[in-house]
Image (cartoon, rainbow, N blue to C red):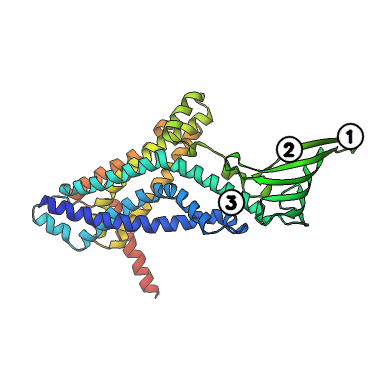
Amino acid sequence: MRRTLFRYLLAEQTIILFVSVFVLTIVLFLGRSLRYTEYLFAGGSGLADFLKLLLYSLPYIFAFTVPMATLIAVLVTFSRLSLDNEITAMKAAGISFYQMIPPVAVLTLCASLVTFCLMAFIMPRGNIGVQLAIVEIVQSRVQLALKERVFNSQFDGLVFFINEISADGSGMQEIFITDERSPKLTRTIMAEEGFVLNQPEEKQIIFRLLRGTIIRVDETMSAVQTINFRTYDFRVDMESLGLGGEVFQKGPRDLDIFELKSNLRSVKRGTRDYNYLLLEYHKRLSLPFACLVMGFLAAPLGVQAGAASRFRGVVMGLVLFLLYYVCISAASALGEDGTLPPAITMWVPTVAFGVLAIIMWVKTARESTLKVITLSRRLGHSVISRLRVRR
């Protein structure tokens, strides 16, 4: 009997989990892809670039969808059991609510391990992959955007004039560049030929110019300097294209858990950088544990709220999930400022919700309704009745 119940509950939860992960991943990726719109469409990028960004973005998206899908899977399963009176039938057969812990535990533990691997090791590499892919797209955009025998002014403070560009956009002949980015110095660069270097790790656009001259004039027009060169690398920051340079900076989120721990040893304790690194380190540990907490919180919530309406429990679960992330954000702000110890603040919301999950399991096993759920039911009935009266 126990094996049958275990397989039955685990199978139903697993199916809903995979469906929820699939749907949530699509929704979150569509929202995240809006950030990449100008990179993908401004320079004629194709399907391959879009798929590359999707592949590298998946670890970051899964780190959020797996915990959320775990909560939804357990919540929907137990809401249906309660709505169809299967919970009542199990109790009549002598099966207590505590005997339903094993299938919930197996599902949530697996989800926690997957989330930990994603956040600790895979997500940082995916973040770096996204950055490098965007740099490659921007570099190819530059090659496509430059037109021959036209004054190209896509860069802030720079004007390019190129007499001839090869068919594939890689080679340029007879190049003229005016550089007015510095208010104290104006540079005019002339080169016989050149090309764009594709080096994503540089986080810059590099024009390698061959056989040319640089003319420097100061702001007073009183001093002129002429430099001849055989090879010259002319570097342009990403900010010059107006594409948000902050996207390309490598930070704590791009470090795996071992790199975070190593960096913590080299940063002075008590500083803002140290607090931020420590917060990120404990976030990688506490958020996977939240899968376990959310799953155990969802089961009694589904039973108590699902008896009245299947969707009411889902709404309450999503509200609790949102509340959890609001608490995490508040804890991050307090820990980063040093108001509270960073090593403790990231665990407070998880521990608090874990205590709430234990209380709800005990009350549900004793067939005692939580006061918050009773109040929400009354509030829901009053709102529905008022809407019906207005109609």
Q: Earlier in the sequence, mark 3 or mark 2?
A: 3
Q: Earlier in the sequence, mark 3 or mark 1?
A: 3
Q: Nearer the viewer, residue 124 or 142?
A: 142
Instruction: List the residue tagged with mark 1.
Output: 223
Q: Quadrant of the C terminus?
A: bottom left
Q: Residues within 10 Å of mark 2 (few under 14, many from 20)?
A: some
| Res 6 seen here | yes
Q: Residue 379 appears at what percent x and percent y?
A: 34, 60
| Res 182 seen here | no
Q: Residue at x 42, y 58 (%)?
A: 26
Q: Residue 325 appears at what percent x and percent y?
A: 41, 46
- The amino acid at mark 3 is Ile
- The amino acid at mark 2 is Thr
Instruction: List the residue tagged with mark 3.
Output: 137
Instruction: List the residue tagged with mark 2.
Output: 231
Q: Nearer the viewer, residue 45 or 124?
A: 45
Q: Could you tell whether 173 is left or right of 356 in the image?
A: right
- The amino acid at mark 1 is Ala
Spatial CA distance of label 3 from label 2 is 25 Å
Q: Nearer the viewer, residue 143 or 339?
A: 143
Query: Which secondary structure, mark 1?
Result: loop
Q: Residue 255 appears at what percent x and percent y?
A: 47, 36
Q: Residues within 10 Å of mark 1 (few under 14, many from 20)?
A: few
Q: Could you tell whether 320 is left or right of 255 in the image?
A: left
Q: State which mark lies toward you, 3 or 2.
A: 2
Q: State which mark lies toward you, 2 or 1.
A: 2
Are dots 3 and 2 in contact, CB under 8 Å?
no
Query: Which secondary structure, mark 2?
Result: strand
Q: Earlier in the sequence, mark 2 or mark 1?
A: 1
Spatial CA distance of label 2 from label 1 is 24 Å
Q: Residue 28 appears at what percent x and percent y?
A: 45, 55
Spatial CA distance of label 3 from label 1 is 40 Å
